[in-house]
Amino acid sequence: MQFNSLGLNDLILKAVQDLGFQTPTPIQEKIIPLILEENRDLVGLAQTGTGKTAAFGLPLIEKLDFSEKFVQGLILSPTRELCMQITGDLTNFTKYIPKATVTPVYGGASIENQIRQIKSGSQIVVATPGRLVDLIKRKVISLSKVRFVVLDEADEMLNMGFKDDLDFILDKTPAIKNTWLFSATMPREVTAIAGKYMQNPLEVTVGNRNSGAGNIEHFFYKVSEKNRFDALRRLLDYYPDIYGLIFCRTRRDTQAVAEKLLKSGYSAEALHGDLSQSQRDSVMRKFREQSLQILVATDVAARGIDVDSISHVINYNLPDEAEQYVHRSGRTGRAGKKGISLSIINGREQGKIKQIEKTANIRINHDTIPSGYAVCEKQLFSMIQQMMSANVDEKAIESYMPAVYDTLASLTREELIKRLVASQFNHFLDFYKNAPDLNDTFKGRQDAGANGKGRNQERGRTGSKGPANTVRFFINFGVKDRITKSTIVRLVCDEAHISNRELGTIDIKREFSFFEVEEGQAGNVYSSLQQAKLDGRKVVVEPAEKNDDTGDRKRKKKKRKQVKNFA
């Protein structure tokens, strides 16, 4: 099937041809005719990189009246990067349509410029939820005449805590409209959004529901915790042509891993929430241009990255949620290309692999960290291949060659090859000369979190065995603040520089929560969180009695003094 058989008008087809599109992707082939032929709500389930923007963008453009200047199409996306990418695509699609205007609305940019663009008239607004809520409350933008709403990467928006913003925005749109929801996975929260704001939606699935893309190979490597970074280096060296994205759990880990890689001679930089917007833009520009080979990122920072040619995704740390693995691995294998997803785990995390396999309906194969010999062999043949495929400019080097021939005349063919290899390859041979085996062959207990039962229901992390002696703390965040156990784990571990294994039971209430910490770390945690903030709000952490579930914050001075003395 070709694009010209989908029912799009000639001006759109001309723009599509300029972009070099000829054959629609599976999701485009399924969804474009449905949207054009029927006025109904729709749920599209497909991985990132499958062409979702054109799937909803092209028929949206076909249905709008561009002689009018008010907002008719609203597209919500989780991140600035995705918002800008969608805006760019729609601007290209409307290239030949007179008076068509697409306005991006997102945080981190001048709100005055966005207000000016909206007031000048725009038929399509592409927005992140937070900035759009701000503009609605300022009465800058009206959604009263919106005919089409697109929720792109709806699961990501909910993962990022935008549920209340989505409720606020969708309540401002007309009751009669078409809503198209696109998501890589369909967790309960997304189903709830669909049930509340959509009327009998048609579900279109490309691939399997909640599953990873079929063109991605998945492997995991089991190592001891002390060998995690060495294992990462070994994998990077084993794939000489890697253009990869490495995921870490925390911003601190992300920065540390990127710095260690940079010091070791790798082309790597970090992408995380502590960077300014200009720093983020600079890093992403270098990565898109492939002047940067390795990007080390947190889940939040990586959302919205739209780069088709990423060859490998490496999970330096597994994600907290199984569904997040699908999003991570979906950054490779895009646009029909093959991709590889690698995970480095320790023995306690093997149960999480089983959980991910079950949730994503994929097979993650166990593999071994390559030996030093295997790495050297791979690097050597990569070097030889590059040499063989190098373009030779005969005219440019002609005048230099007589002197080169004279210098090398005394060497035999074999000696010349050996010296060439040695000059380019000695550093690898030296580094891997006595390289140890990094694989962990210990076959310990299976993670209790593998089947979703046992300790995973009461501990902050899957399969984590809590400490024996703990101190209980109150924290002023609860269900109403959209926090999860993982939120508390990240906060405490990041601020206090402790391992999740030093956390005990986490109990989340409506307006507050409780968490337990190994007794020896209680003073450290208490002092480390005194200046902490979460979502812009001050974190209040105070000692709690073991049997106190009331949230009463009138803590005894004696108890507080006791906690401080633990340090």
Image (cartoon, rainbow, N blue to C red):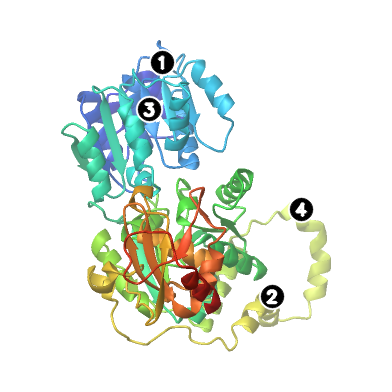
| Closer to viewer: mark 2 or mark 3 | 3
Tell me which corner region of the image, top left, top right, bottom left or bottom right, holds residue 194: top left
Rounded to the nearest angstrom, the CA distance separating label 3 from label 4 is 56 Å
Q: What's under tag 1, amino acid-wise?
A: Phe
Picture coordinates of residue 29, whole percent (x, y): 27, 36
Q: Is residue 119 above or below residue 279?
A: above
- Disc 3 target residue: 74
Dot 1 or dot 4: first in sequence order is 1
Quadrant of the rendered image containing residue 315:
bottom left
- Tell me, for residue 396, which label it has, or none: 4
The image quadrant where one finds the C terminus is bottom right
Of helix, strand and loop, which one carries label 1?
loop
Pair 2/4: label in front: 2
Q: Indicate the amino acid at tag 3.
A: Leu
Is residue 249 something that shows in the picture?
no
Query: What distance separates the C-alpha of mark 1 from that of mark 4?
Result: 60 Å
**Residue at 29% from the left image edge and 69% from the top image edge:** 458
Q: Which residue was labeled with disc 2?
A: 420
Q: Amino acid at mark 4?
A: Ala
State the separation of the CA atoms marked 2 and 4. Answer: 22 Å
Q: For numbered disc 2, what is the local secondary structure? A: helix
Amino acid at circle 2: Leu
Q: Which residue occupies the foreground of this view, 156 or 398?
A: 156
238 is higher (above) or lower (below) than 89: below
Task: Tell me the number on the disc at residue 70.
Answer: 1
Label 1 crowd (10 A; few <14 / some 14-19 / many >=20)? many
Mark drawn on residue 333: none
Q: Looking at the image, which is closer to me, 7 or 520?
A: 520
Q: Earlier in the sequence, mark 2 or mark 4?
A: 4
Task: Judge by depth and name the residue closer to the eye, 298 or 539.
Answer: 539
Between marks 1 and 4 in the image, the one whose residue lies nearer the viewer: 1
